[in-house]
Amino acid sequence: MIEYIISKYNYWIYIVLMMIGFYAMISKRNLMKKLIGMTIFQTAIILFYISIGVKRDATIPIVPEHSHEAIKALEYVNPLPHVLMLTAIVVMVSTSGVALALLIMIYKRYKTIEEDEILKLRQEAGA
Amino acid sequence: MSHSPILIIIIPLISSFFVPLIGWRKKNLCYPLVVLALFISSILSLYIMGSVITHGSIYYRLGGWEPPWGIEYRIDYLNGFMAVIVSFISFLVAIYSRRSGEQELPDRIVHFYCIFLLLVTGLLGMVVTGDMFNLYVFLEIASLAAYALIAIGEDGALMGSFNYLIMGTIGACFYLLGVGYLYIVTGSLNMNDLSQILPGLYHSRVVRTAFALFIVGLALKMGLFPLHTWLPDAYTHAPSAVSALLASVMSKVSVYIMIRIMFTVFNPYFSIELIPITTMLSWTAGIAILFGEIMAIVQPDLKRMLAYSSVAQIGYIVLGIGLANTMGLTGSLLHVLNHALTKGCLFLGAGAITYRRGTRDIRQLGYLHVEMPFTMAAFTIAALSMIGIPPTCGFFSKYYLILGAIDARQWIWVIILLLSSLLNAIFFFRVIENAYFKPLGVIHESSYDRGEQEEANEVPLGMLIPILALAAAIILTGIFSGKIISTIIQFAIPEGI
């Protein structure tokens, strides 16, 4: 069992990180903490994708010019998941950007980023 | 014209970069540019649909790369049909957005148009792409644009937008994880390629986990019942043009992806026989219908009522998917079109009422039939379509859904569908009664003396035309629904059902 966990430790870390982020997103009442949770959640997915491309004792996937030897796939890491993550990182950065901009506007409007206090303020305004 | 699959995405995308540049010097030129871009997109999508009908599916290789490695755009009946819906509704909403935007966000109209075009780009991209990861990127483009568009709405929109952002990100990340799981076992991202590799791996736990992640992620994105919590706030407080676009088109695109994944990427045998997903979907959908409509009955706010009604209508569409027979899916796809037209018309109508009255309280709508006869007529037609009265289109999709439920011998859905029509009637007649049969409310009597003059005070023509066009489309789609089914929808239904 222990060996099973250790041999795939990067995947276990990804699950643990993802659950930490998930917990923060759905249970924290502070909007900033929710946002931090979201970032952890997304980073966990990056870790997962990076893990699936890695091979032990493999090198970067650049084939030397004029090489006449057959290409052994085992000697090179799979670059595709890493490239996908470059795109995903851009997406995640822009998500955080939009979220932070929203938080600034929420703070300007309500002078707090505690969800309960905002709800109370809005109920008072509605009543 | 061989490049039309990419052009329908590129044109709004490029225009969205030009909008701020032009708006910097001349604000007035933005609107024609937006309308022109979306008009070209709509014409191209019609052209694509036409050539799919005459020549069969279109395969477009981005940059000339072969499919399993490069990105392939593949358009068949199903997504050609979706592309037409998305581009036409967004074209009409863009026409509408000028006058309502002038009132709701006077100094931010340039930014509004820029993000609006990005949203349409994302939606069209999700529809035409045949690549799982490309779909994720477009999904995020559309979602990010939607968060920003909701946030520029009225007071309260900020919290709605933030909640949507958190929930939407969870949904998109689940989708991304699902793509990763499929990549581990197949090494492919192309939908067509996946559909050929996957059948041998259906008993793998990784594949099943990926499927579960897809369904949950997309259910979050479309606002299916237990995951709908972000939806009412976001739709209520967004600018009226944005609510119309989100409610009528964005949720439908998520539905389309769900159909695509359940029946194209995975085959119907997997989705129907191997795992109990259809049963789970129909039960959640059934609860969504009743919950959404009961919540809609108690809302005093017109837009919030429509938002809860959207939760119920998503339930209808998912119920058709859950029934997973030809009749049910026909009803489902027809309802995608019908609900896009109907909800678009209702939200635009609600926006028009707000534009003139400055309130969305249903109790204060008295005397509207004199003040805004055309808007109210269109609103009533759309409401009748929601309830399901022939010859409006809403009748036909409900009819097919009920036939599907009878085919599947699941009588409980027949009862729920009939009951939901009654519930729909309750909350829409509440609006109609207030608007047509009640004199001006007490609250308005002092402050609103124009009502006594009994003269029409319609919204500007730019807002009225899209509303009337959608109302006309509702009746025409109803009359020609047989034709639509026989030329498009029957071929859009995935094989093997």
Image (cartoon, coloured by chain):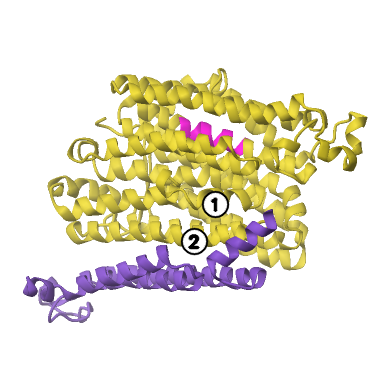
Chain colours: A purple, B yellow
Query: In which quadrant of the rendered view does residue A102 lie?
Result: bottom right
Marks 2 and 1 belong to one chain: yes
Residue type at mark 1?
Answer: Val
Instruction: Please state the chain letter of the residue tagged with numbered disc 2 in the rendered image.
Output: B
Residue B316: x %, y % from top left: 43, 33
Tell me the mark number nearer the camera, choosing from 2 and 1. Answer: 2
Q: Along the horizontal axis of the image, is B254 left or right of B447? A: left
Query: In which quadrant of the rendered view does residue B365 lie?
Result: top right
Look at the image and tell me whether residue A112 can be seen. yes
> Residue B165 has which mark?
2
Residue type at mark 2?
Answer: Leu
Residue B276: x %, y % from top left: 23, 39
Residue B264: x %, y % from top left: 29, 42
Which of the pair A109/B193 is nearer the observer?
A109
Residue at image coords 77%, 46%? B358
Residue B339: x %, y % from top left: 52, 34
Residue where numbered disc 1 is placed: B120
Q: Which secondary structure dominates the residues rendered in magenta? A: helix
Q: Is residue B146 above or below residue A92?
A: above
Q: Earlier in the sequence, mark 2 or mark 1?
A: 1
Mark 1, secondary structure of its residue:
helix
Residue at image coords 45%, 22%? B418
Residue range (magenta): B335-345
Look at the image and tell me whether residue B60 can be seen. no
Q: Along the horizontal axis of the image, is B61 left or right of B344? A: left
Which of the pair B481/B377 is nearer the observer?
B377
> Residue A116 has which mark?
none
Query: In which quadrant of the rendered view does residue B333 lie?
Result: top left
